[in-house]
Amino acid sequence: MRMLDFTLDGSPIRLGITDLVIAGWTGRDAHKLQEHIDELAALGIAPPATVPCYYRAGLETLTQDAAVDVLGHDSSGEGEWILLETPEGRFIGCGSDHTDRKVEAYSIPVSKQMCPKPISAALWRWEEVAPHWDSLEIHSEIREGGAWVTYQRGLVAAMRHPEDLLEKARALGVPTGHGLLMFGGTLAVHGGIRPAADFRVTLHDPVRGRGITHGYTTRSL
């Protein structure tokens, strides 16, 4: 088990994580999903036989640090919502499924294990966002030319609902009980997939007028 410290309503909370699962190819809209398939195909990455799919990754890849190390110059971030299932309740945050694209071209599971998985320290209770889930927005940015530019932007409604992902995961024997931390899938990018040293992702709740942001800088080894 990996114990991680978070904040909930401004107060600290420590939660135990036993399984890291990364859901992939989670688009609800077939056309938007095809966009993501096409942009990855341009990098030589073949789609799975069925969607959605689930990848396991080591707990040691989880990080809340503002600086992480990656190997080479072929990795990039992906802004996503994250879900935690714990005895203390279900929680929602955001993170980046940072992935080595060169490795991804020959093995997606290996690429998932290659890079750190930055996640937010702040969380929301599921009950606070469940009634208006589809109105939440994911916005990721990269720093290019000294300025922050939009890399991804869209509603979480573009991806499968968390309950749907959990149901399908259970049917496949993927861990979904207490201790689960799941990445919920990502959006197509603006301007094509590309590396950037500085990345940040925001999960925005327009109904409650709040957001969770996590940013990090990569150092290429």
Image: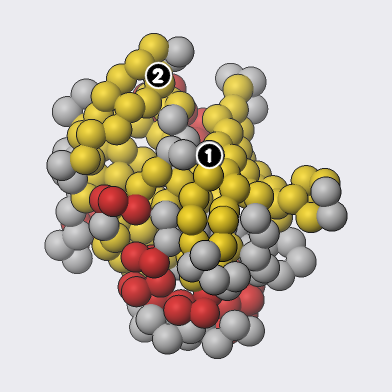
Location of residue 195 by image quarter: bottom right
Q: Is residue 133 visible?
A: yes
Q: Which mark is residue 36?
A: none
Quick check: 211 above or below 192? above
The residue that label 2 is drawn on is 8
- From the viewer's perspective, is the residue at label 2 or at label 1 nearer? 1
Residue 183 pos. (x, y %): 40, 51
Q: Name, please, the residue furthest toward the front.
A: 221
Q: Earlier in the sequence, mark 2 or mark 1?
A: 2
Decide: marks 2, 1 in contact (CB < 8 A)?
no
Q: Which mark is residue 66?
A: 1
Location of residue 152 by image quarter: bottom right
Quick check: 61 above or below 95? below
- The amino acid type found where label 2 is placed reads Leu
Which element carries disc 1, helix, strand or loop?
Answer: loop
Q: In terms of depth relative to the viewer, which is nearer, 136 or 123?
A: 123
Q: Residue 71 vs residue 153: left or right?
A: left
Q: Residue 213 vs residue 18: left or right?
A: right
Residue drawn 63% across and 84% down?
A: 42
Q: Is residue 94 visible?
A: no
Residue 49 pos. (x, y %): 36, 83
Q: In terms of depth relative to the viewer, which is nearer, 191 or 143?
A: 143
Q: Residue 118 vs residue 59: left or right?
A: right
Mark 2 vs mark 1, CA separation in Å: 19 Å
Which element carries disc 2, helix, strand or loop?
Answer: strand
Q: In terms of depth relative to the viewer, which is nearer, 143 or 44?
A: 143
Residue drawn 55% across and 87% down?
A: 44
Residue drawn 45% across and 13% down?
A: 10
Label 2 neighbourhood size at 10 Å, few (<14), some (14-19), many (20+)? some
Residue drawn 59% across and 28% down?
A: 211
Residue 148 pos. (x, y %): 78, 46
